[in-house]
Amino acid sequence: MRNTVKNMPSAEQALLFDQYMAHWQVVLSLGDWRIERGNRAAKNAMASIEVNHPARLATYRIGDFGAESITPASLKKTALHECLHLLTYDLIETASDRGATPEQLEAAEHRVINVLERALTKD
């Protein structure tokens, strides 16, 4: 019989996750996105993010952490993971657009590189 016990964040942990999402939004220069928590839980994942590109809206959901302990560190790392999906979104969209010019692709790539460069070299 399958174990149906869920390891879901408490309301307090979910609020901490929200704070981490806001933190990473600033660190990763994602201020051009509106990032909101959705009402439903993520399916088969600790968290997920869904993008409405024309509205520049990203909706994240928190889900079952499974065997992973829910700690401030695991919440922060998971929030970073979801924000990195958003950081790379435009690059992936541009790369998958067959009509994109090499200049457009390079610009999207450099946006990711410049953000990571600033974030990783802060004192």
Image (cartoon, rainbow, N blue to C red):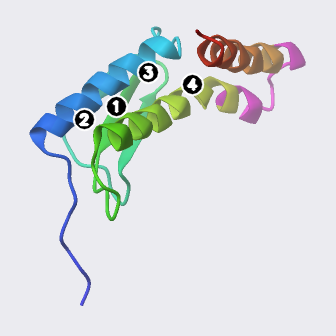
Q: Which residue is drawn at 34% across and 26% down?
A: 20
Question: Mark 3 or mark 2: which is in front?
Answer: 3
Residue 13 position in % (x across, y down):
19, 38
For the residue carrying disc 4, how many other residues have a C-alpha within 10 Å: few (<14), some (14-19), or many (20+)? many
Q: How far apart are marks 3 and 1 (CA)?
A: 15 Å
Per the image, the residue denoted by label 2 is 38
Q: Are marks 3 and 2 in contact (CB under 8 Å)?
A: no
For badge 1, the amino acid type reads Thr
Instruction: Tell me if label 2 and label 1 are in contact, CB under 8 Å.
Output: yes
| Residues in magenta, as a range | 93-103
- Name which quarter of the figure residue 111 lies in: top right
Is residue 23 within the magenta segment? Answer: no
Q: In this rendering, would 38 be left or right of 104?
A: left
Residue drawn 32% across and 63% down? Answer: 66
User: Which SS class for mark 1?
Assistant: strand
- Between 103 and 30, the residue placed more toward the observer is 30
Q: Residue 24 carries which label?
A: 3
Graded by Cα atoms within 10 Å as few (under 14), some (14 to 19) or many (20 or more), the crowding at tag 3 reads many
Q: Position of residue 52 (x, y in %)?
A: 43, 27
Spatial CA span between label 2 and label 1: 6 Å
Q: Which of marks 1 and 4 is in front?
A: 4
* Marks 3, 4: nearer the viewer: 3
The correct choice, above or below, for 121 with respect to 70 in the image is above
Q: Earlier in the sequence, mark 2 or mark 1?
A: 2
Disc 2 to disc 4: CB gap under 8 Å: no
Helix, strand, or loop for circle 4?
helix
The residue wearing badge 4 is 87
For the residue marked with disc 3, what is the amino acid? Trp
- Looking at marks 3 and 4 on the same chain, the residue that comes earlier in the sequence is marked by 3
Q: Is residue 85 in view from this perspective? A: yes
Label 3 – label 2 distance at C-alpha: 18 Å
Looking at the image, can residue 49 be seen? no
